[in-house]
Structure formats: C-alpha cells, structure tokens
Image: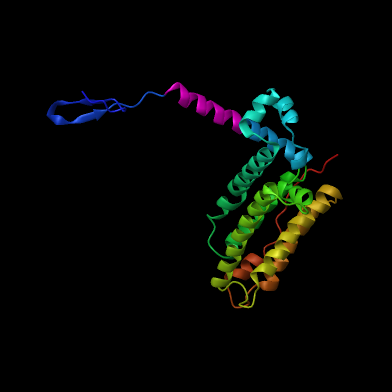
Amino acid sequence: MSTDPDQSTDQPGGQITRLPRARSGGDRALQKGQQTKAAIVDAALGLATHIGLEGLSIGALADVTGMSKSGVFAHFGSREELQISVIREYHTRFEQEVFYPALSAPRGVARLSALFDNWMKRSSIEIDSGCIYISGAVEFDDRNGPVRDALVHSVLTWHTAMLRAIEQCKEAGQLRPDTREEQMLFEIHGLILALHYEARFLQAPGAPERAQAGFHHILARYGAQTDAAAPAAIDQAPRQVSTTHRE
C-alpha cells in the first residue's frame, strides 16, 4: 500500500490510481478568507470613489461591512495596504471594461477608437461617483510612498497601452509619420480630464459629446492623408454618450 499523501491505490497490472485529496478545513478557511477580503475591497472601492482614498479607514469599512475593526484589520494589516488593494482592484476593473474589450477591434485607428470609446463609457458612469485615477492624483501628487507608487504604476500601465495603440496606427500608415505618440496621448488624456471637470464639477451639459468631437478632431489632425481607412473612422459623427448629472 502506498504511503503517498495523495492516497494512491494499487490496481491490477501495476497501475496506480490517485484518489483526489479531500479538501481540508484549512483550504476552506483560506477560501473563505479570500472571499471576505474581496468583499471588503469591493466595499472599500465603493467608498473611495465617493470620498477618496484618503477618506478610507478601518472604522468606516467596519461600519459598512458589519465587521469588527479587528476583523477588517486582520485582512490588511494597515490602512496603507488597504488603499493599495483598492487601487489594484480599480485597475483590474478598468482593464476588464476598457482595455480587453477593445482588443477585438483591428489594430490601428479602429482599436484606438474602441479604447477611447470604452474609456468614455466608463467616464460617463464615474461622473456620478468619481475616478480613482483622477481623485488619487489630487490626493497624492505631492506625496511619496507605496500608495502613490501603486497609483502611478496603474496609470502608467494604461498610458503604455494607449501609446502602443497609437504606435500601431502609425505602423499601419493611418497616422502621419511625424506623429509624436506622447503628444497625441497627452491630448487624448486631456479630453478625459476636461470631461470630468466639466461634467462632474461644472455639471455642463454636452460635455461627453464635446469630448467625442475632440477625439475625432485629433484623429483628423494626425491622420495620414493617403490612408483609406483612417478618413472613414475620422469622419464618423461623434457618438452620443448619455450621462446623468448629479442633482
């Protein structure tokens, strides 16, 4: 009889069948702990979008989740670790909603447009709540430390993806050869920042439509005149993006 921990049993012909190891109580406890931590991070993200990363506290989360302060603290160890977990979760959701769906579009202007459209859709939702990337930049722009580092890393990861999409437009001949990728990204990012300022702070009607029009103006300005696909994408009428302004 085998003494293998996987509980092997001898079978006729010398074959060995391995029986699955029973799930231990420790495994179940670990799974439950991970689920609890995920629930806490979800609640923390909901709070952070409204009150900012700096507004997060172990006590506030204990009230929202119905847990004890010690119970919440046990999953993170510090408020700083909690804030970093929220940033990572926000980035994961951002990728799932903005980046990955756009990969189904062909490389070039079509994919870049899909990235911007998805970014706009998420921004239109966040007008009523808040964007961790934007509010976090205001809170941590003049600070050093791991929370700021995690936030910067997430934003730069997104910028790198956008830069690569712009480079692919150039490689496809859909942008002028002298296009500076960093400048084009700067202008596109500026549209999103202006959208949040006008729609969330000034509550100006029509801000999403102006942001879409701005994006198409950027494509027209940088577009290669000899490319047949670019004008079709550039000449599209700006899509209507609905958003609900706060009362």
**Image check: 163 left or right of 216?**
left
What is the total number of numbered labels drawn onto the structure image? 0
- Colouring scheme, one of rainbow, by chain, secondary structure, one colour: rainbow
237 shown above or below 1? below
**Residue at the image position 53 percent from the left and 61 percent from the top:** 106
Res 118 seen here: no
Judge by depth and name the residue closer to the eye, 191 or 10.
Answer: 10
Residue 188 appears in which quarter of the rendering? Answer: bottom right
148 shown above or below 172? above
Would you say residue 26 sits in the magenta stretch? Answer: yes
Would you say residue 160 sits in the magenta stretch? Answer: no
**Residue at the image position 51 percent from the left and 24 percent from the top:** 29
Residue 112 appears in which quarter of the rendering? Answer: bottom right
Judge by depth and name the residue closer to the eye, 216 or 34.
Answer: 34
- The image shows residue 201 at horizontal and vertical percentages of 85, 48
224 shown above or below 149? below
**Image check: 225 left or right of 214?**
left
Res 196 seen here: yes
- The image shows residue 192 at horizontal and vertical percentages of 74, 56
For the C terminus, the image quarter is top right
Judge by depth and name the residue closer to the eye, 68 or 20.
Answer: 68
Judge by depth and name the residue closer to the eye, 206 or 68.
Answer: 68
The residues colored magenta run 24-38
**Image check: 28 left or right of 230?**
left
**Residue at the image position 69 percent from the left and 40 percent from the top:** 80
In the orientation shown, which residue stands out farthest toward the left? 13
- The image shows residue 41 at horizontal and vertical percentages of 64, 35
